[in-house]
Image (cartoon, rainbow, N blue to C red):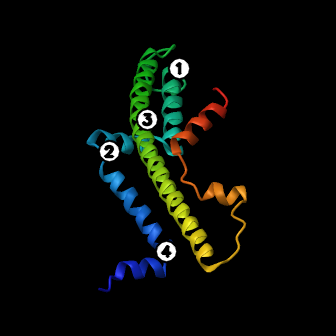
Amino acid sequence: MNDPLPRRAAANPTQNNIDAIAKLEHDALGRRTATERVSDAITKLVGNIGFLLAHVTLIAGWCLANLHIIPGVKPFDPYPFGVLALVVSSESVFLTIFVLISQTRMARQSERRSHLDLQVGMLSEQELTTILQMLQKLCQHMGVNVDSSRQEVQSFSKTTDVHALASELEDKLPEE
């Protein structure tokens, strides 16, 4: 049975990987809740130079209008600009919440990617261990003299204990 997908993957593995990664990203975006979608849209809207310039312009205009600098404009929030402080602080609370919602979603997505990387890494390690073991057996069967006493060959031919590695790494990493 001829399956076109494996031939396409073999013909261009890089493009296949790009397609797989793009699909994962589209799926992750599709899994967002309504709140996360709104939060991402707001974060995208306010996270640019245009938003900053608009704020600088509005605050400068507010101050100029309320300091009697613009002729013909009656001050509506005299110094020390209590209404402006209330508006800006309220806005900052809401923007912080939206940014935190977006960051939480991104952290969750990053954790999923890390788990996927770990899974792929573990599968690769298992595949390579199996290949090394098979290669050693082939060499023995064919009578090829391989220095199997070398520490690296023996070490790489053994199955890696992920829990032991994680424990050793934890013991050797510096405390925060």
Residue closest to the far left: 34
Labels 2 & 4 near each other (Cβ < 8 A): no
Between 11 and 164, the one nearer to me in the picture = 164
Looking at the rendered structure, the number of numbered marks drawn on it comes to: 4
Q: CA distance from mark 3 to mark 4?
A: 37 Å
Labels 2 & 1 near each other (Cβ < 8 A): no
- What amino acid type is highlighted by mark number 1? Leu
* Quadrant where the C terminus is found in the figure: top right
In primary-sequence order, the first of circles 1 and 4 is: 4
In primary-sequence order, the first of circles 3 and 4 is: 4
| Disc 1 residue crowd, few under 14, some 14–19, many 20+, Cα 10 Å | some
Q: Which mark is residue 67?
A: 1
In primary-sequence order, the first of circles 2 and 4 is: 4
Mark nearer the viewer, 3 or 4 = 4
Labels 1 & 3 near each other (Cβ < 8 A): no
In primary-sequence order, the first of circles 2 and 1 is: 2
Q: Position of residue 169 (x, y in %)?
A: 61, 38
In primary-sequence order, the first of circles 2 and 3 is: 2
What residue does disc 2 label? 37
The secondary structure type at the circle numbered 3 is helix
Q: CA distance from mark 1 to mark 3?
A: 33 Å
What residue does disc 4 label? 13
What residue is shown at x 45% (from left), y 50% (from top)?
A: 113
The secondary structure type at the circle numbered 4 is helix
What residue is shown at x 67% (from left), y 77% (from top)?
A: 144
Q: Which mark is residue 99?
A: 3
As displayed, is residue 75 above or below residue 56? Answer: above
Mark nearer the viewer, 1 or 3 = 3
- What amino acid type is highlighted by mark number 2? Arg
Between 7 and 54, the one nearer to me in the picture = 7
Q: Position of residue 43 (x, y in %)?
A: 42, 41
